[in-house]
Image: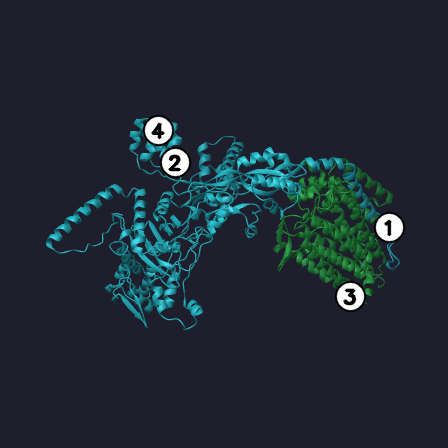
Amino acid sequence: MMLDRLKSLDLILLASVLGLLSIGLLAIYSTSQSGGDTNYFASQLKWIFLGVGIMVVAAFLPNRLYYEISYPLYGLSLILLVVVLFWGTAGYGATRWIRLGGFGFQPSEFAKITTVLALARFLSDERWEINRPKNFAVASLIIALPFLLIAKQPDLGTGLVFIVLALPIFYWVGLNTVSLVLIVAPAVVFIAAFNLYAFAVVIVLILAFLYYTRMPLLRSAGYMVFTVSLWFIRSFFWNQLKDYQKQRITTFWNPEADPLGSGYQIIQSKVAIGSGGLLGKGFLQGSQTQLRFLPEQHTDFIFAVIGEEFGFLGVLLTLAIFTVLLVRIVHASNMYRSEFSSVIGIGIATIIGFHMFVNVGMTIGLAPVTGLPLPFISYGGSALLSNLLMIGFLLNFYRHRYEY
Amino acid sequence: MNNINFSAGNPRKYVYYGLIAACMLVLSIGFYHLQIMQESIYRGKSEKNSVKKVTQIPVRGHIYDRNWGTFHITDSVLDSLMEDGVPYQARLRLEKIKQKIFPTEESFLDTLRKTIGNNLTQRHRPALLKYAQIGKLIVDNRPSFSLYLVPALTTRPALEALGAILEVAPEQISKNFRRSRRFQPVKIARYVTLETLVKLQENRLQFPGLEWKVEPKRNYYFRSSFAHVLGTLGEIGENELSQSEEYEAGDVVGKKGIEKGLDKELRGQKGFKFVKVDALGRTVEDLSPRENALPHPGKDLFLTIDARLQQYADSLFGDRNGAFVAVDPRNGEILTMVSKPDYDLNLFAEAVKPEVWQELMSDSLKPLYDRATQATYPPGSTYKMVAAIAGLNEGIITPQWTIFCPGYYRIGRRTVHCWNAAGHGEVNITAAIRGSCNVFFYQLGLKLGIEQWTKYSRIFQFGKPCGIELTSEKAGLVPSRAYYDRIYGKGKWTNGMLANIAIGQGELLVTPLQMAQFAMILANSGRYYRPHLTRKLVDKIPAYQVTEEALKQLEFQNAPQEILNLLRGLKERQFTQNELSELLETRVTAEEGQKYEPSILEYARKIFPPPDRVSYPAEMIEGIQPEVFEIIREGMRQVVAGGTGWRAGVWQKSGAGKTGTAQNPHGDSHAWFIGFTPFEEPEIAVAVIFENGGSGSGVAAPVVGQYLQRYYYYKGEFDYQKYREFQRMLWEKQKEKARQDSLQGAGIQLEPLNIRSGN
């Protein structure tokens, strides 16, 4: 009986998650090898036990339940996001936490999952075909509501996750390629607007694309006016950002500009990783880690610890496990007969993949410092619980993969 | 394309696989570039050029007595100045301002300039300020050295060699590594002498992970008379670490006394600097000083204690044990607080040697124990005023109510005695206080009942700490009906208890500080202030704040509109004086194109004085009729004016008080005295106890008398010379009278004098 149940689970998925958890524990152990006040290792271990428990429960709940509760949960998470804006606990200049009894949790973590659930339920309904403008607008609204509330906290990193969620999910349910390009283009323009030449090149490329698709002239002209106007909107948005957010972006372009301030983390992180070399300095032997040059090394910059102590090989191994995990999730999403489950699978893959890419990229200066944790590896209970809950969903869907 | 059949699989999945692969490829190339191509660059950086944030320890605040910054010219000042080469003519002129007290440096220097001229004042300014200073510096700091060791770099032989130089066992050193990082320098020794340091420097190659830092240590100017007030410093303990975010392992913090009570103020704020360190964590060089945050030094503490009186009170104890507390009833400032026996603070300036610690701990007299605030004693007869006030205020007795004291009293089957076996005869309340008649108070206690007695004890703030800055202050014990029921069982205790506690015996326990507070309450007829030791806390880098109130004041005084506007923009932010004046000067200059007179800036700065002076609001003992206080105070006046406490009186000064002789199971009685002076407008209230010292009248009162003489002497209101002459004259007169009486053939018993006797 037990064995049957175990066999019904997606063992590849499970194994890769457990692999990542183990790597995380090793790295956290290394950072807390000290007289530090908090024993992060023991604390993380507790969270893992709790999280795995939640995962198992989620895996064996009735499959239909998720469909039924998706809208109510979405509503609840919106309410919580409003609550946290008014009564939340502040940390690092933003209010993200709600305290419940002894421990706090971040409603934004919760909202990620519920938004995917709501979106999946909406899009899996035959009536709401994505290529109709009205349906597209509603689907976008489902994402925009939590995004705006989170951006208001302000939590830029987590907010971005919502934006990024949209495209892979829309594309998965059949958004046509022309629309996709037209949606992506303004984002590219927006980023390119930092440099006049890059901006010009992108505009020309868009013109070429419009010509190629033979879009009616009036619509093409309207679209071009919109994209060009982004050049001006950009500076307005820039002024809307908080000082520390601006600083993060400036630092991303040029960390050496402020080596003791906001660039300190990236420089120290690169030194730690770069000095790790092929084989690394060995477990507990990383001087950068052990001397505490790296701030936030058990949370945001944990991958630098892996890079320093286990070297390039350790990095490749970790990335390989992430690859297996992500490919497996997409592959499984492809197998589900239920479109609802399938969309959720893609949403979860996007969330995990985006976190992974931004966090790992950040440690070597490929992405700005956003404060997104590395899934399954960074220290921190809230993120760990929600990640394991999502894995629980996937295990559940996998068990019911042949059901519609 | 728009109709994807999910049961048949999604052909778009390959786009997703491709995206995942692309992301992983980008990351892998990034890491390959960093870890394989540029490894040597970053390895070099990690070995040599690592930037590290290092905390910097602030200098702990100095401690001064209350008179610091006040001056007077005395004979010894004049003598010292002559030795320093001040001309004789100047001395003659200085004689004129002898003994005059100058409250500030400016007023002193002003007068000097007028008296001996600008030039002489300027030339001898340091000497004048030094010798004429009334106040005393009590504690400052001296540099000392601490050693740090990186565990990862230390070998067993190195530990042994190090142990040999430091004269400790190698295990003592490695013990420090237990809760530390392998690569982080760990403090292994502090207060290392310069000689040891030189020795270590010579053998530096032997100890690769060794570093040293300068760390200030306390330097005490008074060996022991301030021991209990000041308390000691020591390395932070586990539970203190959890109390504040600012604390870190290895910090030195106050462990006892005011060093502990005001640790947050005295310690200052840590700074940090960025340094380059090598792969082993050793500092290579300082980096960009601009980014450093200097440590903010601790505040200087000006005690309420007068060091001269403190030392004098200390000397009055001789080798007797006990405590002495004197407080200014006009504000609660503690002028003197002595606890005997005491200990040598210098023993604690460095890490205490184990054998010294052992000796102090095993001393049966407990010298580490602050008797003024931590010891609790039965107060004896000094507590009789509580029952007296309760009786009068509740209308249980009247001022006219009298009893007859035959020298003993029967309660049930027991007979209790008055201290005066001959009996006091017919006594009313004033006479009972004056003569400290036990029989009167036995009866009063029985009439009063336990509830009233407990209530009034609590009203007078007994049974709870006074709230002085010393954290280990005790509350004492005020027994109540509930307490007796718990201890003895309901109905198993008798009224004998009540008679006993009414005279301040039995389970009742008080601290000397509480008794001083009680004396203050009686001196002020009910008004009191929290007794405290802090007069001022002065920030070396004072913070200025533009408050609404300050702006209003400036506006009222017609400050220029430009300055007001500027200041409005700076509201609620804190500045140091330099920052503020720079800001005002540059902004005003830049914005208005003209420079304001410096006086305006000066003026604007003076509006926001640092709030350093400590004061507590007046509190009032509520619900007691003023007449009741009058009767009690009159009784206490008579105690000093010819009653049991006559030895506490000061010639030509009025006073009031009460003696106490508290029996206790641990040997001889404790000698108590509490009192205040002058009677009309009290400016000092005292409480003294001599442990197992004997009688309050014979032992405690004379010491108070001597102390108060000295107090008035320092105020310039008591002249020892004249007093001795007066005494001699009086003695002659008495001798003459006695001779005449003996001629008449009738002996006469001398009335006690209203002054202290010769010894």
Circle 2/circle 1 CB separation < 8 Å? no
Subunit under mark 3: A
Chain in green, by letter, is: A
Type of amino acid under label 3: Pro
Is tag 2's residue or tag 1's residue first in the polypeptide sequence?
A: 1
Quick one: label 4, few (<14), some, or many (20+) residues within 10 Å? Answer: few
Q: Element at badge 2?
A: helix
Cα–Cα gap, marks 2 and 3? 86 Å
User: Residue B105: which disc?
Assistant: 2
Q: Are dots 4 and 3 on a single chain?
A: no
Label 4 or label 2, whichever comes before in sequence order: 4
Residue type marked 4: Glu
Q: Secondary structure at mark 4?
A: helix
CA gap between label 4 and label 1 equals 100 Å
Give the chain letter at badge 1: B
The residue under label 4 is: B83
How far across and how far down the image is residue A150, in percent? Answer: 68, 52
Tag 3 secondary structure: loop
Left or right: where B547 falls relative to B322: right
Q: Amino acid at mark 2?
A: Glu
Q: CA separation, marks 2 and 1?
A: 87 Å
- Please give the residue where the numbered disc 3 appears in the rendered image: A62
Question: Do the residues marked 2 and 3 share a common chain?
Answer: no
Please state the chain letter of the residue tagged with numbered disc 2 in the rendered image: B
- Toward the left, the furthest residue is B744
- How many neighbours does mark 1 have within 10 angstroms: few (below 14), some (14-19), or many (20 or more)? few
State which tag comes first along the sequence, 4 or 1: 1
Which chain does the numbered disc 4 sit on?
B
Check disc 2: other Cα within 10 Å, few if <14, some if 14-19, many if 20+: some
Q: Which residue is mark 1?
A: B14
Q: Nearer the viewer, mark 4 or mark 1?
A: 4
Q: Which chain is cyan?
A: B
